[in-house]
Amino acid sequence: MTSYATSSLLTVGLLVCGALASADSSAVRMTITTPTDELAPRDALALTVEYENLTDNHLVIACGAVAGDSRLLIDYTRPGHQSKRFTGFQHNRAHDDVKLFPTRVPPRGSFKGTLSLIVDTNPDRFLLEEPGSYEIRARCVDKRVRPILDLRSNVIVVRVREELTLRGDALKSYDTDLGRLAQFTPPLLAAPDEPVLEKASQFLDEHPDHPQATRLKHGLVRVLDLKIRRHRASDAQRSLHERLKAELSAEGSGTQ
C-alpha cells in the first residue's frame, strides 16, 4: 500500500506508470464512449476511456496502454467473427494519445483519455474493415496488487456503413502502413521505414481531404521529429516537417 506524507491519497495503478493500488475495483467505474456510432470502413475509432472515482478519497490514476502486469485491454467483435483482442497498441510503450503522468482525481471526480484505434497488428488489418456492427468493450487488469484490480467497461456498438466508403484511389491507397502511422504504432515511430514516409507524403499530396489526413499528418510529424532529433533527417524531410506543422497549425489542430 502506497502512502503519502502530506496527503491521504488512495492509489490505483490502473494503467501505465501508475503506482500500486490500495483500493479495490469497487472504487472506480470504467466507461468507454465514442463521439459517433456510425463510421466508414477503415475509419479511426476514437475511443474515450473514463475512470470515475466513486470514493470520498482522492485517487491517483495514471493512464496509458500497457506496462507489464498493468494493462488496458480492448476487445471487439466484428461481423461474422468471434470476439478478438485488439493488439494495435500492445507494446512496451504507451499509446501516444493517452496521458502518461499520474493524475490526482478528487473525490467523486473523473479522468479520461482517448485512444485512436485504426489498425490491428495480429493479423495486420484495419479494425473497421467490413460493413456491419462492431461491439467494443474494455478491461483494465492490474496484477501487481492484491486483490487483483479488474475493471470492466460497458459495451458500445459502432456501425460501419458501406455507403460511407471512399471510392477509387483514395480507398486503395490508404493501406495499413498509413493506418499504423496515423495510429502512432510504437515500432513504426522507433524505426521508421523510409518507403512508408515517402508513401505518406505522396498520399497527403494526392488526397489532402481524406478523412484521416490530419491524423496522418500528426503521425508523420512525430516520426520526422524523431529523425530530426537523431540528426537523420534529409533536407527534404526537414522541409516537409515544417510544412506539415504549418498546415496543422492552420487547421487548428496543432502538433499533438
Image (cartoon, helix red, strand yellow):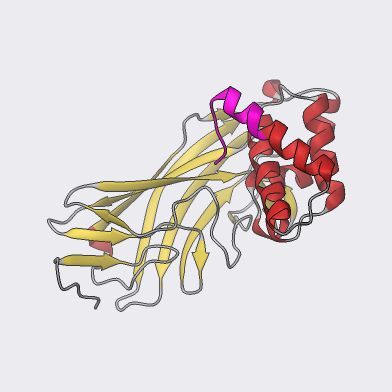
Residue 164, above or below 65: above
| Residue under the image location 60 percent in, 57 percent down | 89
| Residue under the image location 76 percent in, 45 percent down | 176
Q: Give whichever of 57, 232 is nearer the camera.
A: 232
Q: Give whichever of 208, 127 is nearer the camera.
A: 208
Q: Quadrant of residue 20?
A: bottom left
Q: Quadrant of the C terminus?
A: top right
Residue 159, above or below 29: above
- Let me know if residue 80 appears in the view: no
Q: Quadrant of residue 85?
A: bottom right
| Residue under the image location 73 percent in, 54 percent down | 227
Per the rendered image, the range of residues in magenta is 245-256
- Let me know if residue 252 appears in the view: yes
Residue 47, above or below 204: below
Q: How many marks?
A: 0
Rendered location of residue 57, percent (x, y): 14, 59
Confirm whether the magenta stretch covers residue 252: yes
Q: Quadrant of residue 95?
A: bottom right
Left or right relative to 78: residue 179: right
Rendered location of residue 228, percent (x, y): 72, 52
Q: Quadrant of the N terminus?
A: bottom left
Left or right relative to 116: residue 189: right
Rendered location of residue 131, percent (x, y): 67, 32
Q: Give whichever of 52, 165 is nearer the camera.
A: 52
Confirm whether the magenta stretch covers residue 56: no
Rendered location of residue 236, percent (x, y): 83, 40
